[in-house]
Structures are given as C-alpha cells and as structure tokens.
Image (tube, helix red, strand yellow):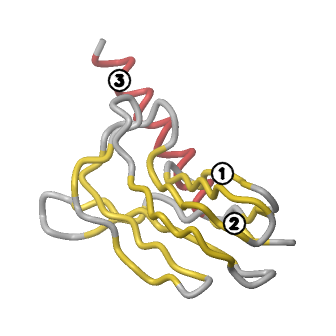
Amino acid sequence: MFFKNAVRRVVVSAAVVAAAMSTLVVPAQASMEGCNGVACILIKGKGLHVDFVRVGLEKFSFDRYAHFHIWGGGIDMNTPTKTYSWDRGISYTLELSRSLPDGAQICTEGWEHLPDGSLKSFGRPCGTIKS
C-alpha cells in the first residue's frame, strides 16, 4: 500500500510540474472548462454573457487547503481559504450574470497553503471569452 501511494505521488507530482510549464487557454464561446496542473476553471454562459465562473480541483486529485485567485475581464479576487475537494464537491462559484468584452481572458491560479506558512501554486487555467 505504501509503495502504491508513493508511486502515485511521484506520478501526480511529475504531471503537475509538466502541466505547470504551460498555461491552458481555451475559447469560451458559450461555456468552457479546462484544467492546468490540478486547478480547474468552468466558465458558463452564452456568447459574451457569462453566468458564472467556478474554480476547483481536477478529478481524482487530493484535497488541498488552498485559495484561488481569479482575474481578468474586470475581475480580480481571491476565494476563501478552505479545504477544496473534488470528491466532496467543494469548489467556489463566482456569480457574474453580465457580459464581458470580446477577447477577455478569465484565469484562476490555485494556491495551496502549506504547513510552514508558505504558498505553492498548483495550476493556472484560463478561458477566453469570444462572441
């Protein structure tokens, strides 16, 4: 059991490092979702109108005590610091219900709060709003 967990952690760590080397940018015409590292973003809407932005963890990832920074299209905010969890459905939803400029890019970056008080980025996915 210990060996399987150790191997899984090494594989996950390698995937996080590889994914962190590039930022995912996906057009969000009506809606989009994507992940980078283990941070994920979901933008829901139609055309330039965005209903909401949801940020959370990638499927099957470990829980993280963290916060997300969300920015772009006139947004610049941090989510509450708490334990985010894919399997327990703990994410953060920012209700917008407004139109954003064509070409606006909405991004999020996940920041894990480590026991020593430092922060560690675990992904930065983005979506571009297009008409």
**Which quarter of the rendered picture does the C terminus lie within?**
bottom right
- Disc 3 or disc 2, which is closer to the eye? 2
Q: Identify residue for label 3.
A: 5
Q: Which mark is residue 69?
A: none
Compared with 20, 100 (above or below) is: below
Tell me the amino acid under the disc marked 2.
Gly
How far separated are the C-alphas under marks 3 and 2? 33 Å
- Disc 3 or disc 1, which is closer to the eye? 1
Tell me the amino acid under the disc marked 1.
Gly
The residue located at (34%, 39%) in the rendering is: 85
The residue located at (47%, 30%) in the rendering is: 60
Badge 1 element? strand
Residue 123 horizontal/vertical position (percent): 51, 60
The residue located at (71%, 69%) in the rendering is: 49
Q: Earlier in the sequence, mark 3 or mark 1?
A: 3
The crowding category of the residue bearing disc 2, from other C-alpha atoms within 10 Å (few below 14, some 14 to 19, many at least 20), is many
Q: Identify residue for label 1.
A: 34
The answer to whether the residue labelled 2 contacts the one labelled 1, judged by CB atoms less than 8 Å apart, is yes
Compared with 2, 104 (above or below) is: below
Residue 69 horizontal/vertical position (percent): 41, 72
Residue extending furthest toward the left? 116
Tell me the amino acid under the disc marked 3.
Asn
The answer to whether the residue labelled 3 contacts the one labelled 1, judged by CB atoms less than 8 Å apart, is no
Q: Identify residue for label 2.
A: 127
Q: Earlier in the sequence, mark 3 or mark 2?
A: 3
